[in-house]
Image (tube, helix red, strand yellow):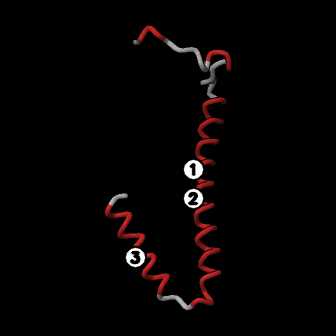
């Protein structure tokens, strides 16, 4: 784990420890929604790229997807 990531986690834990317990369920919901939105954005970006490649004709037949090219070895 990088030092920067550790610092962020420590800061988050410090902030969370200062919250009254009655707010923790709401915070948990916020964190889960944030995580889901970040994950969905990356999946959406991949789907958009795949669609653009398909529309541009940048595709291969399925049978060729796992054919290994030994000429570059």
Q: Is residue 50 left or right of residue 11?
A: right
Percent x, y for residue 25? 64, 81
Circle 1: element type:
helix
Q: In 3D space, how far apart are the residues under numbered discs 2 and 3 (Cα atoms)? A: 20 Å
Q: Quadrant of the C terminus?
A: top left
Q: In 3D space, how far apart are the residues under numbered discs 1 and 2 (Cα atoms)? A: 7 Å
Mark 2 lies on residue: 38
Callout 1: 10 Å neighbours few (<14), some, many (20+)?
Answer: few
Q: In 3D space, how far apart are the residues under numbered discs 1 and 3 (Cα atoms)? A: 26 Å
Q: Residue at (58%, 71%) from the top-left corner? A: 31
* Label 1 or label 3, whichever comes before in sequence order: 3
Mark 1 lies on residue: 42
Circle 3: element type:
helix
Say if mark 1 contacts mark 2, CB within 8 Å: yes
Disc on res. 11: 3
Callout 2: 10 Å neighbours few (<14), some, many (20+)?
Answer: few
């Amino acid at each position: 784990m990088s030092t920067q990531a550790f610092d962020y986690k420590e800061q988050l834990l410090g902030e969370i420890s200062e919250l009254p317990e009655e707010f923790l369920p709401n915070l948990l919901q916020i964190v889960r929604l944030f995580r889901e939105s970040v994950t969905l954005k990356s999946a959406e970006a991949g789907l958009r790229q795949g669609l653009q490649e398909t529309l541009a004709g940048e595709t291969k037949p399925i049978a060729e997807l796992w054919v290994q090219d030994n000429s570059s070895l």
